Image (tube, rainbow, N blue to C red):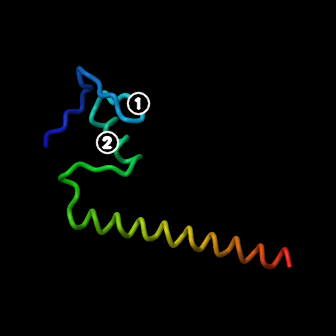
Amino acid sequence: MVYFSREWTDSLLLPDGSIASSVAGLEKYMKANNCALREDYSDEYLKARRRRNEKAQRDELFSEFIHNYKRSIWYE
């Protein structure tokens, strides 16, 4: 795929209402919303995404555990 560094002549209206006028703007939107082009769904990408999701879930569970532990100590 060829990337042009200049702005496009026509802008894209993205689903969140923002406007992308260059490849950099489109990539910024895609990264912020955890999106990727079809070509980016390689095995490595999917493994990294799965690891990132599992880590986020572990972090959330640990945070919830600590919160409940503190509540059990403070409110007994």
* Separation of residues labelled 2 and 1 (CA atoms): 13 Å
Placement of 3 over or under 10, stated as above or below: below
| Residue at (41, 30) in percent of width and height | 18
| Residue at (62, 70) in percent of width and height | 63
| Residue where numbered disc 1 is placed | 18
Give how far across and how far down residue 10 sits, in percent: 25, 21
Q: Nearer the viewer, residue 9 or 63?
A: 63
Q: Residues within 10 Å of mark 1 (few under 14, many from 20)?
A: few
Q: Nearer the viewer, residue 23 or 52?
A: 52
Disc on the earlier residue, 2 or 1: 1
Q: Are marks 2 and 1 in contact (CB under 8 Å)?
A: no
Placement of 13 over or under 65, stated as above or below: above
Residue 70 appears left or right of 25: right
Q: Residues within 10 Å of mark 2 (few under 14, many from 20)?
A: some
Tag shown at residue 61: none
| Kind of residue sitting beneath label 1 | Ser
| Kind of residue sitting beneath label 2 | Glu
Tag shown at residue 27: 2
